[in-house]
Amino acid sequence: MSLQLEIDEKRYTPNGEPILSQVQFQTAAGEFIALVGPSGAGKSTLLNIVAGLDTQFSGRLTVDNQPLHQGRDTALRIGFMFQEARLMPWLTVLDNVLLVLAHTPDRVARAEAMLQAVGLGDALHAFPSQLSGGMQRRVALARAFVVQPQLLLMDEPFISLDAPTVQQLHSLLLDLWSQQKPTVLFVTHTLLEALSLADRVLFFSRAPARIIHQQHVELTRPRSTAQVSAVAEQLLMAHPEMLAGEVSV
């Protein structure tokens, strides 16, 4: 499965300034891509366009040269993880995951197995208010992967969490990704996070956003902090003007 994105232009209003302009790239099947750039550059907008949540743009999205979206139908199973966990507070952990599954005989077993995989097997009947922020993100991660997505969209999914929790979630994400191998588009403002996770990092300019650099990450996984920091330092030295003030390290 190869996803091709050709976004000629995206504006929020007909006479407004463009937020995205001439954004074009192609993914390989199972590739993990991080999108890095300044706030307001349209990275979240790009994910909404890919998800089919925003259709007001000029350009095209194709999968193996076929349209990604045709009305309400999509050519792929898509998972989406947002900046907030977005759990229904009146539903249990299990019911929040069941929300995204079709009514098949095995749906409960699938949801329970996925929650077990993210370390929440003992919290199936808890409510979101009873969970820590990290546990809520684990539920969101389980909900994203339980549909066995071919394409996984992640919009700063671990923002506002403490560093040890983020490291645990990174490891969990990579474990699930290595098992299912969806194509991933992962938005982050942190260069080290992008280099820790991704096969390729796409750097966006300020609005109207375009891709100004892409970096293939050749490091094998798991990646040490020292390895990632060395690559980040090389990037910052090679492209000081491009990256200055654009992303945090």
Image (cartoon, rainbow, N blue to C red):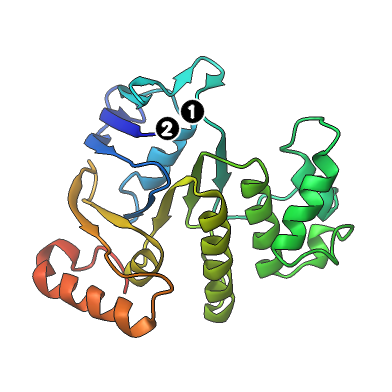
Q: Position of residue 100 (x, y in %)?
A: 71, 38
How many numbered discs? 2
- The residue nearer to you, when weighing 86 against 96, is 96
- The residue nearer to you, when weighing 213 against 84, is 213
Which residue shows up at 70% across the image and 57% down it? Answer: 139
Label 2 sits on a secondary structure element that is helix
- Give residue 52's mark: 1
Dividing the picture into quarters, in which one does residue 239 lie? Answer: bottom left
Query: Which quarter of the rendered picture does the C terminus lie within?
Result: bottom left
- Contact, mark 2 vs mark 1 (Cβ under 8 Å): yes
> Vertical placement of 99 versus 161: above or below?
above
Q: Decide if residue 201 is on the left or right side of residue 132.
A: left
- Give residue 168's mark: none
> What is the three-letter code of the residue carrying label 2?
Ile
- Give residue 49's mark: 2
Count neighbours of disc 2 (C-alpha within 10 A) and say few if under 14, some if 14 to 19, many if 20 or more: some
Q: Position of residue 168 (x, y in %)?
A: 58, 74
Count neighbours of disc 1 (C-alpha within 10 A) and say few if under 14, some if 14 to 19, many if 20 or more: some
> What is the three-letter code of the residue carrying label 1?
Gly
Separation (CA) of disc 2 from disc 1: 5 Å
Q: Position of residue 236 (x, y in %)?
A: 17, 72
Q: Decide if residue 192 is on the left or right side of residue 232.
A: right
Label 1 sits on a secondary structure element that is loop
Task: Looking at this view, name the residue that lies furthest to the bottom.
Answer: 226
> Vertical placement of 211 versus 193: above or below?
above
Dividing the picture into quarters, in which one does residue 162 lie? Answer: bottom right
Which residue shows up at 56% across the image and 18% down it? Answer: 72
Which residue shows up at 36% across the image and 67% down it? Answer: 190
Which residue shows up at 52% across the image and 79% down it? Answer: 163
Would residue 150 be visible to someone looking at this image? Answer: yes
